[in-house]
Image: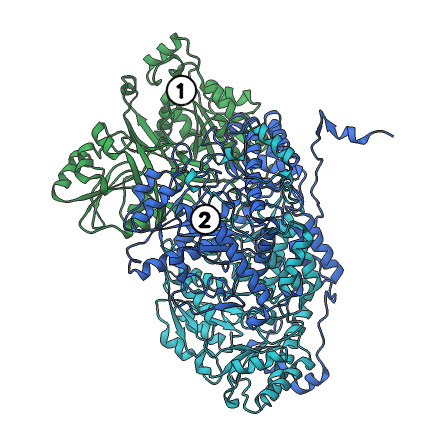
Chain colours: A cyan, B blue, C green
Amino acid sequence: MREEKPTVYPYIPNSVPTVKNQMLKEVGAKSVEDFYEDIPEKLRLKEKMNLPKPLLSECSLRRHIEKILSKNKTCQEYLNFLGAGCWQHYVPAICDEVNQRGEFLTAYAGEPYDDHGRFQALFEYASMMGELLNMDVVNVPTYDWLQAAATSIRMASRITRRREVLVSRTVSADKLSKIRDYCKPEIEVKLLDYDSETGQLDPNSLKAEISSKTAAVYFENPSYLGFIETHGDEISKIAHDHGAICIVGVDPISLGILAPPIEYGLDIVCGDLQPLGMHMQFGGGHAGFIATRDEENYVMEYPSRLFGIAPTSVEGEYGFGDVAYERTSFALREEGKEFVGTATALWGITAGVYLALMGPQGMREIGEIIMQRSHYAMLQMSKIKGVKCPIFQSTHFKEFVVNFDGTGKTVAQVNKALLTRKIFGGKDLTEEFPELGNSALYCVTEVHTKDDIDRLADALKEEVE
Amino acid sequence: MEDITKKRYTDGKPKLRRFHQARWDEPIIFELSREGERGILILEVEDEIKNEVGKVLSTIPENMRRKQPLRLPEISQPRVLRHYVRLSQETLGTDLNIDVGQGTCTMKYSPKVNEQLVRVPQMTEIHPLQDEETVQGILEVLYNFEQILKEISGMDQFSLQPGAGSQAIYANASIIRAHHEARGEADQRNEIITTIFSHPSNAACAKTAGFKVITLYPDEDGYPDLEALKVAVSRRTAGLMTTNPEDTGIFSPNIEEFVKVVHEVGGLCSYDQANANGILGITRAKDAGFDLCHFNLHKTFSAPHGCGGPAVGAIGVTEELAKFLPVPVIEFDGTRYHLNYDRPESIGKVRSFYGVAPVILKAYAWVMSLGAEGLREVAEIAVLNNNYLLKKMLEIRGVSAPYAKGKRRIEQVRYSWERLTKDTGVHSEEVGLRAADFGVHYWTSHHPWVVPEPCTLEPTESYSKADLDEYIEILRHVSEEAYANPRLVKTAPHNSTIHKIDHAPLDDPSQWAMTWRAYRKKVGKETG
Amino acid sequence: MDKSVFYQSVKRKLGLIVNPIAGIGGRVGLKGSDGEEVQKRALELGAVPQSLNRAVQALERVTSLKDDLEIITYPSEMGEDAAKECDFDPIVVGSIKEGKTTAKDTKNAAKEMLHLGVDLLLFAGGDGTARDIYDAIGDRMLVLGIPAGVKIHSAVFAVNPISAGDLTVLYLRGKCGIREAEIMDVDEEALRRGFVSAKLYGYLRIPFEKRLVQGLKTPSGGGEREAMEAIACEVTDRMEDDYLYIIGPGTTTRAITSKLGVNKTLIGVDVVLNGKLVGTDVNEAQLLKLLKKRDAKIIITPIGGQGYIFGRGNQQISPEVIKKVGRENIIVVATPEKINSLRGRPLLVDTGDRTVDKMLSGFIRVITGYNEHVIYKVSY
């Protein structure tokens, strides 16, 4: 039963009763009930849905949301050293400005004519990533790194027509979980050991596990545990000797100072765009990229859209469109070319803006700055009694593992204590990597000042010594 | 002073807009590069740090150091901004146009207040691994929204983790597989049934999840064919994955029978609710017997489309299947919200962390501003708008609405321009490109084109009667042009940012280029 | 703004053959137009040749490419008239006796155009004209039919003349794929006596439109060739030992035998056992003999434009054979494009035996790809 005075909703222009009635008349319907004639009576909801009372005024809505959100403690109020898949980097104002533009924010699937700007922005993002990676093909981004890694592995499987992947043991549990679920229909996942001193993927483990059944080898650089993998050349050589494809997951913000993986023989490169201009957003700023060489057998296996440049009927005009839209499968036995749909295009555009602002100098500087800060942090923390930092004898980028075994305290205890001092300590790895004992994964980026790091070191010192 | 207003109307109707899209002839960003320009400077490192750590770059093993110069463009800040603002002007977002032409996408108004609410530090500057005590606010939003979806769908538990509709369908297929595995029937049950008018992701995701896909064609009236389903089911059936109403805007009246038939052979039923906009508060997944469902928060629930994401595909399941949901699940004990990872039978991770929180927050805010009655109004007006549009569309020369003749539709319709094409040789895509000359979008159909010369329109509740009249007027005008001067329509668009694209290079491996560097190489201008 | 875009700047050559008597019987109620007798009768009844009009309708769509195109055609009623009526300035080859043209003229014209290297041969006619062209040049040239016959059974024709013209333009602009299409041989005498008897005659290559599918959120799955290969994988993966596989004619079924490494006759029925050919272009008797010793499965695909899975081009698989094999052992294969081209019409059967037709009708599983099936209606 409708109420006496129907509400006119600001978001629903035709909720004005006179307009509604006029339209009903024009359509020849007595009421909106007519339109639902195909829905059996039995399936019709008889009562009103039991939902919270509406906040009809914008003011009350705003207050409600702000009140709830005020219960959150931000990484501006607290000092944050968490990483592990989501990282705190500085987001330039222009990045937010561009992804707030109503046109970009609300566009979707228009043609390369009416949405030419969207196509160009995404082509430029792919192009700039291409420069970062020294690769000629980059996809319109997928959901996140988990999906990019999983898809890269399935692409490799299709290309090689093999059904086994060898994955480095130092990837996150989340990533492994996703890879296992996504590969389940087709591909067996085997883990490769790492050197307990350096953390590095053990090439002997690879040699032992690899066979003619191996479609791909997957590792990350820097590793999930923060160190830079140095055996890339050897790993890719072993893979290629066995006809397998070599896949690496990278941190794009490190590529101003680290070598593009193609230089050490990598075939497919994937990773997360979040560091390039996306706020953390509780894990909502992720986007996964996949890049390969410009070879037909690789291009044909991308499930994503690929935007290419094309001429138009007017000289000097840039046009864009989908490349190889009718993508054929070279390995027809594969269970489909996966799927594609809405993913994370706006973040792709934002990453492009970030790279354009930073330029080559900025990317070089930020890599060095991050390392300077993280190395400083490692030095300070290693001075604390009972703390071993970093546990791996390798060069680290922005993350590193800290071990608390010598302090007699668990990571949980340490982090609780840090919390009282308004510090978010590193991610507790005790369950994820039990062989590392009471260890935590700390992340230090360009946003952490000397004072911030000193504050952390002091707090830890007080807590454990 | 003359009355300008009078000249803007003919017979009381506003004249068509003399729209022209922005055309900036904007270079590719690399062409804007000027050596030495900087777009932003980074927080400097303190001397004490530098002194203590020394030359960090030399600690990187030689073979891992970047040696080749990085060839990103060098552009100062205002020039970067100008470039992107121009590109955005060349994009026809929903904010700008009567976006009823992107059928199945549910292009409704994304309230700006919600946009502002998610850009505060309490949403942007929170890390997903922070101690739960410090993120009770956002956990409350996620939890509350799950409860809302439970009420809307009738399902027992939700996960907001999947990153869009397709990922949600894949997750549901994974859950179906896990269910049968737990019963030792996974090997036996390797078939998933879907319909040709369901969203193609239903077939694609099922196939990716390792299932054999059986597609049903509709009966003569365009309804999913129950008799065909009966032939399709067997002990090998793992489940049914279907969109309802389908992309034709037709609600399957037999949907309950469909579910019964599949249940009888031991299969599960998953409801793709991408097309939920017309049935909110009208009918629910659970009542038709479905075991799983999913919603697109960036469609029905108003979160903006963002050029193609970020997005959320919320999945809902019955109590029996809840144990398989992706991990973690959000729980509430009366005072605190808590993330529970102790789910041994979960299918694992579908996406990083817990879902795209800002999108969920926008969806939550939208529902909170409307309430149960508001959602009902959304559905009713969406359906009224659609049937109004249907009536007017059928008055246009050359248009037909195949199937379910004379019957009402739910929230969208797939039209056919077959008659127009027969009479004039003008194809549906060409009509669409000419419509773009008046500032609107237009979408044909998913592949394959079962309906010939298709055009799928979905007005949603966001457009006024005047907006719909304008859209109709545009299509009517283009139709008339097709009959009188087909060449004009076939060579459209004329008022767009660019002219007719030559697609040939995009299918030719020796010519295609997905990055600027690839392009420069292929046109022979590679330097160094 | 009307600039045409071309791959090459060289002038393309379009061949044009009009069969002046095609379809002449139709308007006056005669079924078909073969034979001088029928033609005489038709003209007596006041029939007016339709093919000229049809050819003109098609050519009018091509006039925008006039400057970049050379039309090569035969004299007066066999194409020159049609071309000139559209303001083309055609190159006219060959010679005919006006008003007394025969199939031989069609064949000569086709041969001549092959010799001159035309890019596409447009012809206005019916099934008979298609067969004549096939007889003359096989599938060595790309062709497209402008329908002007009475009832067309062959799949080498465009839907209508306007469509033929548009397709020609698209092809000349490089926007078409190429596929093989069936030519049927319908016994017109039988047709006049009230029943259809169609044999598969051969295959010609025709252009088809690669529709620019737009507004996409999901890519399409691949072209025809790839779809056929996927189907071939699906079928061969599941083939069982010691079963005879009776494989009907068609390009999709040929993809299956190719996968097995076996040479299939394009228009005949072949039999395979354990991956080897044990029967080539067999007739009903030979099939029945083979069936005495072993169980069998039948693999068939719709032939021709109307979607017949039995009764057009594979009558060797007779009602007897079908009954012996059993409905559950019939495997139907078809690409998704083929299913969609039916536009919702059911697949058809016409075995000649009503009980068998009834048994076959209802719903049937069709293999449309790897791990992809469709449930489709079959009617009689």
**Comparing labels 1 and 2, the label whose residue is closer to the camera:** 2
Q: Please state, as top left, top right, bottom left or bottom right, where the C terminus of chain A lies in the image.
A: bottom right
User: Callout 1: residue from which chain?
Assistant: C
- Tags 1 and 2 in contact by the CB under 8 Å rule? no
Q: Residue at x 27, y 21 (%)?
A: C195
Q: Secondary structure at mark 2?
A: strand
Identify the residue at the far left of this view.
Answer: C293
User: Callout 2: residue from which chain?
Assistant: B
In the foreground, A29 or B103 = A29
In the foreground, A112 or A312 = A112
Identify the residue at the far right of this view.
Answer: B1
Decide: few, some or many residues near mark 1? Use Cα within 10 Å; few <14, some 14-19, many ≥20: many
From where the camera sits, is residue C129 visible?
yes
Residue B192 position in % (x across, y down)? 36, 50
Which quadrant of the view contains residue B404? top left
Q: Residue at x 67, y 71 (%)?
A: A76
Residue C209 position in % (x across, y down)? 48, 37
From where the camera sits, is residue B209 visible?
no
What label does residue C22 carry, if any? 1
Q: Please state, as top left, top right, bottom left or bottom right, where the N terminus of chain A lies in the image.
A: top right
Distance (Cα) linking label 1 and label 2: 52 Å
Q: Is residue B446 above or below residue A204?
A: above
Q: Disc 2 residue type?
A: Asp
Q: Residue at x 48, y 23 (%)?
A: C55
Q: Which residue lies under the disc numbered 2?
A: B272
